[in-house]
Image (cartoon, grey):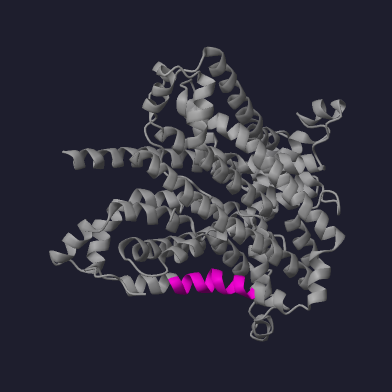
Amino acid sequence: MAASRSVLPGFGITLGCTLAYLSLLVLIPLAGLFWKSASLGGAEFLAAVASPRALAAYRLSFGASFAAALVNAGFGLVLAWVLVRYRFPGRGIVDALVDLPFALPTAVAGITLTALFAKNGWLGQWLEPLGIFVAYTPLGVTVALVFIGIPFVVRTVQPVLEDLEPEIEEAAASLGASRFHTFRRVLFPAVWPALVTGFALAFARSVGEYGSVVFISGNMPLRTEIAPLLIVTELEQWNYAGATAIAAVLLVISFGLLLGINGLQRYGARRLAGGRAA
Amino acid sequence: MSTDWILPNSPPRAARRAGGALADPPWVRALLTGVALGFVALFLVLPLATVFLQAFSKGISAFGAAIVEPDALAAIRLTLLVAAVSVPLNAAFGVAAAWAIAKFDFRGKSLLVTAIDLPFAVSPVVSGLVFVLLFGAQGVLGPWLQAHGVRVIFAVPGIVLATTFITFPFVARELIPLMEEQGSDEEEAAISLGASGWQTFRRVTLPNVSLGLLYGIVLLNARAMGEFGAVSVVSGHIRGQTNTMPLHVEILYNEYQGAAAFAVASLLAVLAVATLVLKRLLEWRMGRASCAARERGHA
């Protein structure tokens, strides 16, 4: 690792501090988790990560995260389009509000959504007579994850829509393409890498999400227990081995998603740059 | 490599003109706007309004009582203390990391940038767990710590550690792209004119990135004060001692003290709204600053 001919000072000390701080705070603790799970016997590890309760928790975590990310992909695309292309009163406020799920502590979101969707809540009192039960069901988990995931799709798609050259659409229109045809053949191909990235970001965040979900889910084992909650439950019963094994599984999946998302973003950036050069 | 994942928060460009050949038919416009605003109203406006309405559901005096109650005050103090440690630490780290990464070329740089993003990829619960495994009673360093009478887990140091872990990337990921974009010409000029490294940083670099730094700090602070999952794993939930505001909200809520829970939650919601307002203001200022820089470049 050598700095390539620069007159600026401070490379050694800043990189040294960065690496030391990163190692102490992040890398060593994370490595400790893998070290600990490797020290479990194969049978013990398997019993923890493949118990019916753990499998049900993964199913719920991944299923609800996937459903929530899909909902966000759809509504997020519409919201980004409306924010970029249309002008209406209050647009600035709506645009700022999109970041609310980043700024609002997850526990606050959790109790608020529960209060809204509970039997006597503002929304629950109308939905439950219709047979739609949200609080304390897998649907409730999905609703909380939709809330958490809103900014990801909007904020990845928005800059791509802003960068689109209007000339391309004008050309398509002047060549006789209908608006729908233009969207399908001209706009969508430009936007989809960002849309998939936003979907993946929302999904990745949702898989690990805890605070906003634990209140609305009801936390029934095998039914509404998400994987991060199962880790907490195991810890509270002093079952460190079980908690560590499940955490290692989640961690490997998170790293896989991180690498996948980085790849997607590089692909999207290349496409965008290629489109501009052409 | 892009560092823009998880928090794609670069300031939005000046919105493009709408209209002309781009205009969608009026019914499409109305339909899409309706769908978008309906979604925002249901999932964003309604929850935010609910927090405040529930907080005052038992009247203003009950609201005040829930906030000045000793356990609530202790939770507020602890939350401020945790932020007061985590925010400067991670801000200093972010500046150092951005200097090394943006101003120099070295092997393994993109790996380092990815590693800095790691805490955003990890579930908050897992972030707390790694510190329990290191410092807990059954952890690697647990027996040694116990022998020396130091408590990390179920105590304030653990809460600070977990919060610092969770909020680690905020400032770095904000400053790295910003400093890369600005290049090092101005710094090189200052050095060649005889300024010391520290003078160059303080007089040239810092003023150039101050808005971005502030932007990162605002987001970092919001997360540090609001973190729940990681902190809940390491805190032990000792009332008046190891409860931060979000944990206090949880306890009140689970004890069916809904109005009190929402009263404390509403303070956190005010923090969230203040964060959004500050973020918008800074984006606006940064947008103007970068426009001005571009115009200077063209002149």
Horizontal and vertical percent for residue B187? 22, 60
When the figure is inspected, residue B14 is found, relative to residue B179, above or below; the finding is: above
- In this view of the protein, which residue sits in the foreground, B187 or B45? B187
- In this view of the protein, which residue sits in the foreground, A144 or B46? A144
User: Which corner quadrant holds the N terminus of chain B?
Assistant: bottom left
Residue at far top of view: B26
Q: In which quarter of the view is residue A277 placed? A: top left
User: How many circles with numbers are drawn on the protein?
Assistant: 0
Horizontal and vertical percent for residue A252? 65, 64
Residue at far front of view: A175
* Observer able to see residue A22: yes
Horizontal and vertical percent for residue A271? 44, 44
User: Is residue A23 found inside the magenta-colored segment of the image?
Assistant: yes
Q: Is residue A47 left or right of residue B200?
A: right
Highlighted magenta segment, given as a residue range: A19-32
Q: Is residue A194 left or right of residue B16?
A: right
When the figure is inspected, residue A236 is found, relative to residue A75, above or below; the finding is: below
